[in-house]
Image (spheres, rainbow, N blue to C red):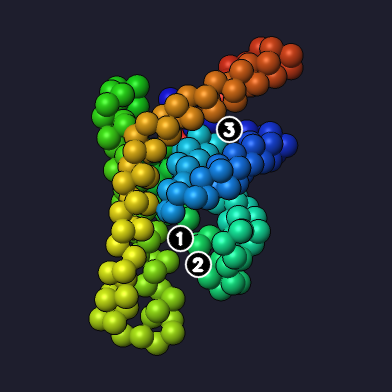
Amino acid sequence: MDGITLGGSRKVAAVSMFTALAIATDYAMLPLANVKLMDSIVFICALTFGVSAGASVAALTWLVYGTVNPLGPDSGPFLLLLIGSEMVYVAFGYLARRMLSPDLSVPTRSLLWGSFGLIGAFLYDVNTILTPYLILGQSLKVSLSEMLFAVPFMLAHEVSDFVFFATVAPVLYIAARKVALRQDTGLVSRHSTGPLETEHV
């Protein structure tokens, strides 16, 4: 259950596929405030294909969705903050990649990944809500009081991420591995007799 090593062109293809999926689901779920599959997609991409792939998907998705958005585009500094905050899911993808084990039961894995989603959403929300106020010079006390108004949106984000990471992410992970391994098997059979190589990042 190691991560999968991809060549340059195939890593670009994987990043493009995951980015397209993240952007498409972002627009499809636009009416649901703070409920998105993007976090799960970034997490699974980092878990399956490595940190650089996950970080690329996070950045590219926000560059598109944050710029071309019916609710209004995000400003340059705030867009950078959103991209940086999304990297928490890349970090958890890396951590989950290191913890992969055939001995990990399905319920345990779902609970673990769901916890990653919940904690990641909390860290993401705190950073994207508090940091702008602090940069503008407001005190931490005032900034925390302002954050109280965002609690319903934070709860929606955290609960939905827990559910998606526990249920959708495992299915996406299995599908991504099957596609990648099938492609690798085809390459091996055409070009060599060596085994499929996998790696931990």
- Which corner quadrant holds the N terminus? top left
Question: Which is nearer the N-term, disc 3 or disc 2?
Answer: 3
Going by the numbered disc 2, the residue's amino acid type is Leu
Q: Are marks 2 and 1 in contact (CB under 8 Å)?
A: yes
Image side of residue 78 versus residue 110, left or right = right
> Is 122 or 54 nearer to us in this picture?
122
Nearer the observer: mark 3 or 2; the answer is 2
Whether the residues at callouts 1 and 3 have beta carbons within 8 Å, the answer is: no
Q: Nearer the viewer, residue 96 or 39?
A: 39
Tell me if mark 3 has few (under 14), some (14-19) or many (20+) residues whose alpha carbon lies within 10 angstroms of its own. Answer: many
Q: Residues within 10 Å of mark 1 (few under 14, many from 20)?
A: many
Amino acid type, callout 1: Ser
CA distance separating discs 2 and 1 = 6 Å
Image height check: is 109 above or below 68? above
Give the amino acid type for the residue marked by disc 3 in the picture.
Thr
Which residue position is annotated with label 3? 5
Q: Specify which label sits upstream in the sequence, 1 or 3.
A: 3
Q: Which residue is mark 1?
A: 85
Disc assigned to residue 1? none
**Helix, strand or loop at disc 2?**
helix
| Residue at the front extreme, as displayed | 31
Label 2: which residue?
A: 81
Q: Residue drawn at (59%, 39%), measured in percent from left and top? A: 21
Residue 188 percent across, percent down from the top left = 67, 17
Up the image or down, 71 lies above or below 158; here it is below
Say whether residue 3 is left or right of residue 143: right
Q: Which image quadrant is residue 124 in?
A: bottom left
